Amino acid sequence: MQPAIAPLPQIVPALGPWLDLAGLAVFAASGALAAAKRGQTFVTLAFFALITGVGGGTVRDLLIGAPVFWVRDERAAAACLVVAAVIWLTPERWWRGEALDWFDAVGLAAYAVFGAAKAIGYGVPPVPAALMGVVTACVGGVIRDVLAGEPSILMRPELYVTAAALAAGLYVALVLLGVVAPVAAVVGATAGFALRAAAIGWGLKLPAYRGRR
């Protein structure tokens, strides 16, 4: 019998929905910027923002049998569209540098924990639940890269998916060991963010396969 674990918004009832929207907005911004850097129309920016922001959560909800979150909560789609509008109306120089990478690192770690917590809350076993955290945090970016014609984050050696896996896996492991869910969430998200931050700051990468000439 799987432990009954509340999804993250129930763990932090006051801040959960707003943290969820903040993370979604960061991912939406990365999608809108991918279109903006190619000189696309506002419609394309909005589409990229939406698909990047809600892509991972949509796949997760479909796999675990949950109502698709952004279909039930209009704030999610609205946040993506607002982000797209802000980027459309502002100059490109505002979005240069590594600032978005750092915001993305926070969103990645938090969303990985969020996805794992929601999956377990729906009765998903521990290992698939941790993988649902990775799906939540990364699939939107994969879709964005495919649509933009860029190498997917799955095909890069940088520590991105690995950071999401650390955050989600550590959260699930700690909860199974009896750590209270809010503490496990903070520890998991912090560890995932720290690994992603190290990758950004020091260029850490996974070793590539060397068996091929």
Image: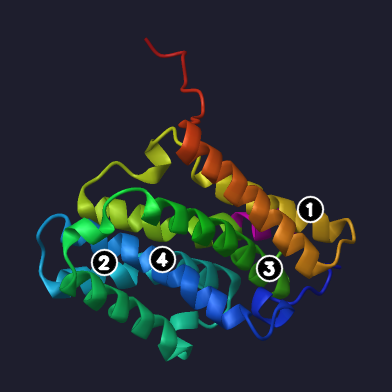
Does the CB distance between marks 2 and 4 fall below 8 Å?
no
How far apart marks 3 and 2 lie (CA) works out to 26 Å
For marks 4 and 3, give the one nearer the viewer.
4
The residue shown at (42%, 81%) is 76
Quadrant of the rendered structure where residue 31 is?
bottom left
Q: Amino acid at mark 1?
A: Ala
Q: Which residues are magenta?
A: 126-131
How far apart marks 1 and 4 lie (CA) works out to 27 Å
Q: Amino acid at mark 2?
A: Phe
Check residue 117 in the rendering and tell me which mark sits there, or answer none: 3
Looking at the figure, which quarter contains the N terminus?
A: bottom right
The question of residue 127 being in magenta is answered with yes
Q: Around disc 3, counting alpha carbons within 10 Å, would you say few (fewer than 14), some (14 to 19), or many (20 or more)?
A: many
Residue that carries the numbered disc 4 in the rendered image: 26
Decide if residue 202 is on the left or right side of residue 35: right
Q: Amino acid at mark 3?
A: Ala
Nearer to us in this view, 1 or 14: 14
Q: Amino acid at mark 4?
A: Val
Decide if residue 154 is on the left or right side of residue 191: left
| Badge 2 or badge 4: first in the primary sequence | 4
How far apart marks 2 and 4 lie (CA) works out to 12 Å
Does the CB distance between marks 3 and 2 fall below 8 Å?
no
Q: Position of residue 107 (x, y in %)?
A: 50, 61
Name the magenta segment's main secondary structure: helix
> Helix, strand, or loop for circle 2?
helix
The residue shown at (35%, 85%) is 78
Check residue 48 in the rendering and tell me which mark sits there, or answer none: 2
Residue that carries the numbered disc 1 in the rendered image: 173
